[in-house]
Amino acid sequence: MAPRTPTTPSADQQRLDDLVRLRRVRDRIDREYDRPLDVAALARDAAMSPGHFSRRFRAAYGESPYQYLMTRRIERAMALLRRGDRTVTEVCFAVGCSSLGTFSSRFTELVGVTPSAYRAGAGPGLPGVPACVAKQVTRPVRNREADRGRAG
């Protein structure tokens, strides 16, 4: 085994450095969810190749960068739809989606009802509950079956 030089980071230090970069990228996704974001650009921000970035992101946060981005967009869309002052199409574009079909499919997959039905009040209703609590309780769940298994 070669002796470690002072310039060679340990494996633990490298993992910590990776997590710091991944958190910065995750924070960027949280801030810029409504802008066009692609994995290659996010990977560059993390100083990683796209494949390595995607694997490390999934290991750290439990979902791929694209899934994380879509979850953020759907969370924001839910809030905008609850307000009721925008059409589904306006909400779709406001959260950064460029395809109404993809937006509607992902929304239905994560929330369990279509965006139109959610806007009409078919979503989880929480009258009188503060928005900060409603946001946590109504957070989209990507894999509802796995979630049910843990609850039982």
Image (cartoon, rainbow, N blue to C red):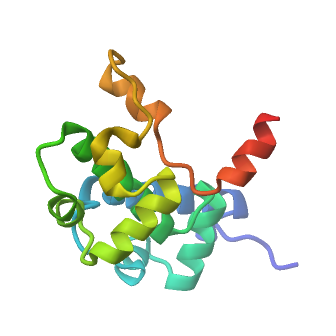
10 vs 85, left or right, is right
Residue 37 in view = no
In the image shown, does 33 or 119 lie closer to the viewer? 119
Q: Quadrant of residue 47?
A: bottom left
In the image shown, does 56 or 88 lie closer to the viewer? 88
Q: As displayed, is residue 112 above or below residue 132?
A: below
In what quadrant of the picture does the N terminus appear? bottom right
Residue located 35% across and 26% down the image: 132
In what quadrant of the picture does the C terminus appear? top right
Query: Whole-percent x and y of residue 30?
Result: 33, 53
Query: Whole-percent x and y of residue 107?
Result: 41, 60
In the image shown, does 84 or 16 lie closer to the viewer? 84
Query: Whole-percent x and y of residue 16?
Result: 59, 55
Residue located 11% across and 44% down the image: 85
40 vs 89, left or right, is right
In the image shown, does 68 or 112 lie closer to the viewer? 112
* Residue situated furthest top in the rendering: 128
Q: As displayed, is residue 10 above or below residue 76?
A: below
63 vs 115, left or right, is right
Query: Whole-percent x and y of residue 67?
Result: 49, 66
Q: Quadrant of residue 149?
A: top right
Residue located 45% across and 53% down the image: 113
